[in-house]
Image (cartoon, grey):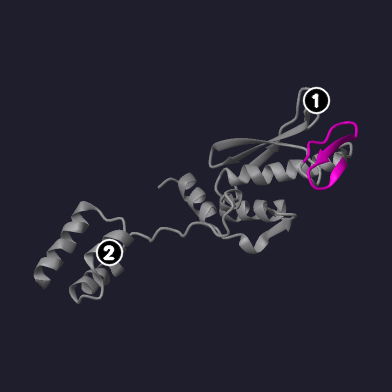
C-alpha cells in the first residue's frame, strides 16, 4: 500500500467524535484539531488559501455572495475545495445586508459579510478540504462514528494461532474468511486444516 493510501486510511478511520462541536443542528470540527490531526499523520502536508487575480482570498458576486477556496496537498495529491460565506442560519452573506423570510420565524436579516466572516469561512473550507482526504468524512454523511478499520491481514505470528483456532473448533473457516482478506494459498491452508479435522 502506498504512503498516500496509508495516510488516507488512517485519516478516514480516525475517530474525532469527541472533538465535534454542535451549532444548531449541524456538527462541525474545529480547524485547529483537523489540521493538527493531519500533521500528526502526515507532517509534510501543506495547504493553500487560493487568492484571486486581485490578491483577495475570495470571489464576490452581487447576486450569489462570497466564495472562498482552499487547496490541500498530502503525499503529492492535491484536492481543492470551496465554500460560500454564510451567516448563522446558513444564508449566503453579501456586501450589503438583505432580508429573507423563514417559515417559522418570519422576516430575518442577513448582515453584510466582514473579513471576520471570510476568514472563518476559509478555515471551515480547509476542514471540508481535509475531509476530502478522509478525516471526519463520516460527520458530513451524518454518522456518529467512523467506519471500523478492517482487520489486519494475519501476520506469521498470529497465522499459526488462526490455524490452531480452526483446528480446535474455536474459529470457523467462514468467520476466518469474513474477518481477514486472505490469499488463495492461505484459504487452501485453511481448507487443509478443515479436512484434517474431519
Which of the labelled discs sits on residue 176, or is there none?
A: 2
- Residues rendered magenta in the picture: 91-108
Q: Quadrant of residue 91?
A: top right
Q: Decide which of 194, 22 is in the foreground and name it.
A: 22
The residue indicated by pointer 1 is 63
Quick check: 114 above or below 155?
A: above
Q: Decide which of 86, 37 is in the foreground and name it.
A: 86
Mark 2 element type: helix
Mark 1 element type: loop
Q: Is residue 118 left or right of residue 30?
A: right
Q: Residue at x 88, y 31 (%)?
A: 95
Give the x, y percent position of residue 148. Answer: 46, 60
Give the x, y percent position of residue 92. Answer: 78, 36
Q: Residue furthest top?
A: 53
Count neighbours of disc 1 (C-alpha within 10 A) and say few if under 14, some if 14 to 19, many if 20 or more: few
Give the x, y percent position of residue 66. Answer: 79, 32
Q: Is residue 121 magenta?
A: no
Q: Is residue 56 left or right of residue 145?
A: right
Quick check: 196 above or below 67?
A: below
Q: Decide which of 110, 115 is in the foreground and name it.
A: 110
Give the x, y percent position of residue 40. Answer: 60, 56
Q: Is residue 46 left or right of residue 110?
A: left
Q: Is residue 97 magenta?
A: yes
Amino acid at each position: 500500500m502506498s504512503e498516500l493510501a496509508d495516510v488516507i486510511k488512517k485519516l478516514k478511520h480516525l475517530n474525532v467524535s469527541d472533538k465535534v462541536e454542535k451549532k444548531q443542528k449541524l456538527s462541525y470540527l474545529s480547524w485547529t484539531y483537523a489540521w493538527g490531526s493531519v500533521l500528526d499523520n502526515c507532517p509534510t502536508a501543506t495547504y493553500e488559501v487560493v487568492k484571486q487575480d486581485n490578491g483577495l482570498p475570495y470571489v464576490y458576486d452581487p447576486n450569489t455572495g462570497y466564495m472562498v477556496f482552499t487547496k490541500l496537498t498530502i503525499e503529492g495529491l492535491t484536492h481543492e475545495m470551496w465554500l460560500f460565506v454564510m451567516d448563522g442560519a446558513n444564508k449566503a452573506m453579501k456586501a450589503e445586508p438583505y432580508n429573507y423570510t423563514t417559515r417559522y420565524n418570519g422576516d430575518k436579516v442577513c448582515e453584510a459579510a466582514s473579513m471576520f466572516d471570510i476568514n472563518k469561512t476559509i478555515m471551515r473550507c480547509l476542514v471540508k478540504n481535509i475531509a476530502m482526504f478522509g478525516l471526519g468524512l463520516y460527520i458530513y454523511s451524518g454518522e456518529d462514528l467512523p467506519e471500523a478499520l478492517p482487520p489486519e491481514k494475519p501476520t506469521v505470528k498470529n497465522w499459526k494461532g488462526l490455524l490452531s483456532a480452526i483446528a480446535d473448533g474455536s474459529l470457523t473457516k467462514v468467520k476466518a474468511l469474513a474477518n481477514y482478506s486472505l490469499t488463495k494459498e492461505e484459504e487452501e491452508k485453511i481448507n487443509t486444516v478443515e479436512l484434517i479435522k474431519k
